[in-house]
Image (cartoon, rainbow, N blue to C red):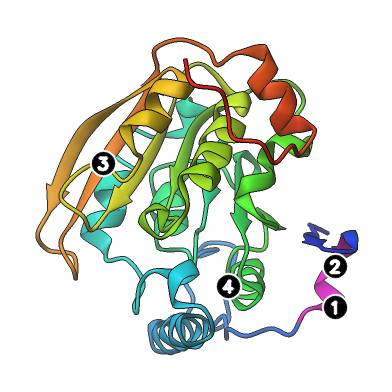
Amino acid sequence: MGLALNLLARSGPRLWTKADLMIVEQTGGKTAAEPYAPRRDTQFVSQHLAFLRDWLSDPARVGALAPSGRSLAKLITSGISHETGPVLELGPGTGAFTQALLEQGVAPSNLTLVEYGSDFARLLDARFPDVRVLWMDAARLAQHSLYVGAPVGAVVSGLPLLAMSPRKVTMILAGAFQLLRPGGYFVQFTYGPVCPVPRPVLDRLGLKATLVGRTLRNIPPASVYRITRRRPPSSTFMGSLRAGATASPPAS
């Protein structure tokens, strides 16, 4: 499938096709029967090199020295299946959560990955050729038409929210919930002791957070929270996000 990466650079959107990309992961001779099973040795090396390289260039953005483990991937994707419909993943990194989503039955055509790191975006495009990969900032979700309407059933986030400003966290959540259908939800993991979304941000957006569970088998141990709607945000606030306004959102 001729999918493209959408680079939202300072100069504006630009489309990058597969021919433009340097392939950074060996696929180990994938077959139709094993579409998402690259050789484990090359997969391991590629993932950890990508994490280390991006962490060295921008520790706050990456937020971790190594990819998430299988126990965390299983926890954060629990309850998501082919019945969920379209799924949006933010900050997929090397694809640990992506792999879990596909294994749980999410169709590649129903999965969209939003990744800001260029090395990660190239790796994801090589590893999951049938999945839509967008090279963009998740804080700009409200400013771009990724879908027709609001069809998304779940948003899975691997973003390091604790390293972000409250304003950026607000923009990410507001943009994500603009794409979620009624009953849809946002799941986020954290290495911290409490939900990584500040309570004032949840209140402004009319959201609530519920602990899904914790895993001690991940390094470091992590918790997962499910964020759902209590009420919709004001139309004024959503309008300011679509316009790319820089003023802080109004308090409720």
**Viewed as shown, does residue 40 lie left or right of 121?**
left
CA–CA distance in space, label 1 to label 3: 39 Å
Residue at the image position 57 percent from the left and 74 percent from the top: 30
Q: Is residue 174 above or below residue 191?
A: above
Quarter of the image with the N terminus is bottom right
Amino acid carrying label 4: it is Phe
Whole-percent x, y for residue 145 in the image: 79, 35
Residue identifier under label 1: 20
Q: Earlier in the sequence, mark 3 or mark 2?
A: 2
Instruction: Identify the element where label 3 is drawn.
Output: loop
How far, Cα to Cα, is label 2 from label 4?
14 Å
User: What residue lies at 47% left-to-right and 87% top-to-bottom?
Assistant: 56
Circles 1 and 2 in contact, beta carbons < 8 Å: yes
Q: Which residue is mark 2?
A: 16
Reading the image, the residue beneath label 3 is: 195
- Give the distance between the C-alpha atoms of the residues marked 1 and 2, in whole angstroms: 6 Å
Hey, what amino acid is under mark 2?
Trp
Residue assigned mark 4: 120
125 horizontally vs 93: left or right = right
Range of residues picked out in magenta: 13-21
Residue at coordinates 90% horizontally, 63% vertically from top-left? 11
